[in-house]
Image: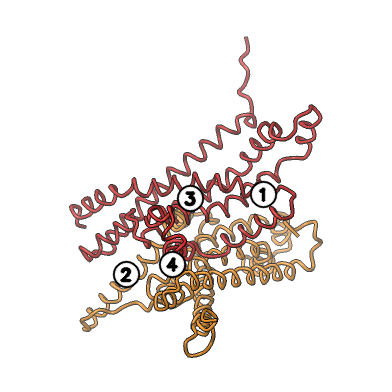
Chain colours: A red, B orange
């Protein structure tokens, strides 16, 4: 075991963690916003919007993320319309392309998860809210959204872990995140196993932290379901 | 018209090339699913066993292979396997680089990942078997092997079909990452075709569409299999009949 090499590798890789985290958080945030829009369309009852949402979900869940990322990164630049538009300075950046494709992809998966959460809201609760005169946005904000979010949380935390793993694909469109830096290190040192094992360890730790944070969130949101602490007797 | 010619079967067309690559993708995924079934069964058995150390091994396996990016695992198996084989070659007196065939490395890597997910599917399916049935089998004196063959295995398979369908879809999409080893499956073929014609958008759209065909067809196959496996059950007792 060459501990000097391992520790210097670890230091180099940890310097790339911020890039991975930026990729991850930007794509989760924008993906979740987009997923909310898609979910709203999916449950809207309008045939056109529902059809669009279904097609979106089908396309982005049915094809590999890598091909979507390459389509954005290599495919979009092919069109003059995009190449000469104000968007090009952004779309030229590998980071923007990676975030865009990660967000589009996770929106498809998350929309299905959110819809599952909404379906789990009992109709009785909605009826009760309607009977006291809530409707429209108030109904969503007070009744549907909180309950649906709680139901969707376990599946959504799995999706978030999948996204953390998916950020590794950004190395293939030349973003220097952990996997990309690991590959660069390997081409300099030819010590494949050590470097990749260090990178794997970093991802394991990141995913462990995410899972712990999500289960803490789940725990704090289910306070009303916990048995009461034994009341004190005077 | 020129676009159609590019996609056709003729001399200038990439159609046959892409279709052949689609078959390779299916072959990688099917091999991976088979490898994963063996590994998944072993890991599920370890997780369900009474031995604490076996349970720990199973837990570590599923945590590691579901927590590390698929791309890294593929790199690790491909490069790690190759350096392992080179070392064996040197020991046998052959000096020079020996590479692991990219098909084998890819199928093994995707299979190892799919094994972690399949283990969870099998474990869930085992827990779905009513305890009473196993007690009944014990009561009429079935031994361990017979119990496994007659009571546990048929039901685990039936309960596992929907989960296996999901794992298959996951592996199908993971198999696109095997393209980094140079294996010409659908992803790599779209890359080559788009690179040499400079029609990136067209070929990635076509590649993506072929993946959509694969995923939706396999969805149907698994739904059919589920219906067939449950044909003797009343709809009310099975999960999502």
* Label 1: element kind: helix
Label pair 3/1, CB-CB below 8 angstroms: no
- Camera-side residue: B152 or B64? B64
Residue linked to disc 2: B79
Residue at position x 27%, y 64% in the image: A192
Q: CA distance from mark 3 to mark 4?
A: 33 Å
Give the residue pinned by disc 4: A78
Mark 3 or mark 4, earlier in chain: 4
| Residue A164 image point, x, y percent | 44, 51
Decide: is A105 above or below A231: below
Quarter of the view holding residue B72: bottom left
Q: Would residue B214 be found to the left or right of residue A173 on screen?
A: right
In the figure, B25 relative to A213: above or below?
below
Residue at the disc numbered 1: A41
Q: Is residue A192 left or right of residue A51?
A: left
Q: Nearer the viewer, residue A49 or A67?
A: A49
- Residue under label 3: A161
Q: CA distance from mark 1 to mark 2?
A: 45 Å
């Amino acid at each position: 075991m060459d501990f000097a090499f391992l520790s210097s590798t670890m230091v180099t890789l940890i310097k790339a963690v911020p890039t991975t985290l930026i990729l991850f958080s930007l794509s989760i945030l924008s993906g979740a916003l987009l997923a909310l829009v898609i979910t709203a369309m999916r449950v809207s009852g309008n045939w056109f919007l529902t059809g669009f949402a279904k097609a979106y979900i089908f396309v982005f869940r049915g094809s590999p993320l890598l091909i979507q990322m390459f389509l954005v990164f290599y495919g979009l630049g092919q069109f003059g319309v995009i190449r000469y538009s104000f968007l090009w300075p952004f779309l030229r950046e590998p980071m923007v392309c990676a975030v865009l494709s990660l967000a589009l992809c996770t929106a498809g998966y998350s929309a299905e998860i959110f819809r599952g959460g909404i379906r789990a809201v009992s109709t009785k609760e909605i009826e009760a809210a309607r009977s006291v005169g809530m409707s429209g946005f108030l109904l969503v904000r007070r009744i549907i959204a909180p309950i649906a979010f709680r139901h969707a949380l376990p599946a959504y935390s799995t999706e978030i872990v999948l996204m953390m793993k998916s950020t590794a694909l950004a190395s293939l469109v030349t973003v220097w995140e952990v996997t990309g830096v690991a590959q660069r290190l390997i081409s300099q040192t030819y010590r494949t196993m050590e470097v990749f094992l260090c990178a794997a360890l970093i991802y394991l730790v990141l995913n462990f932290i995410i899972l712990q944070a999500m289960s803490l969130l789940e725990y704090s949101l289910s306070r009303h379901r916990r048995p009461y602490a034994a009341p004190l007797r005077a | 018209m020129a676009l159609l010619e590019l996609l056709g079967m003729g001399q200038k067309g990439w159609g046959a090339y892409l279709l052949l690559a689609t078959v390779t993708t299916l072959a990688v995924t099917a091999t991976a699913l088979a490898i994963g079934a063996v590994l998944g069964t072993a890991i599920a058995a370890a997780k369900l066993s009474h031995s604490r150390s076996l349970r720990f091994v199973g837990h570590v396996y599923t945590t590691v292979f579901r927590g590390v990016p698929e791309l890294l695992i593929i790199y690790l198996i491909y490069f790690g396997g190759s350096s392992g084989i080179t070392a064996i070659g040197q020991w046998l007196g052959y000096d020079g680089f020996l590479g692991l065939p990219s098909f084998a490395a890819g199928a093994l890597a995707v299979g190892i990942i799919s094994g972690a997910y399949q283990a969870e599917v099998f474990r869930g399916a085992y827990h779905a078997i009513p305890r009473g049935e196993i007690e009944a089998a014990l009561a009429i004196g079935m031994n361990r092997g017979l119990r496994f063959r007659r009571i546990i295995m048929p039901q685990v398979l039936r309960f596992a079909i929907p989960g296996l369908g999901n794992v298959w879809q996951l592996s199908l999409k993971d198999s696109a990452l095997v393209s980094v080893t140079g294996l010409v499956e659908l992803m790599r073929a779209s890359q080559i075709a788009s690179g040499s014609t400079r029609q990136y958008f067209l070929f990635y759209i076509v590649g993506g569409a072929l993946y959509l065909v694969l995923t939706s067809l396999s969805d149907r196959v698994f739904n059919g299999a589920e219906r067939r496996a449950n044909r003797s059950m009343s709809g009310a007792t099975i999960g999502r009949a």
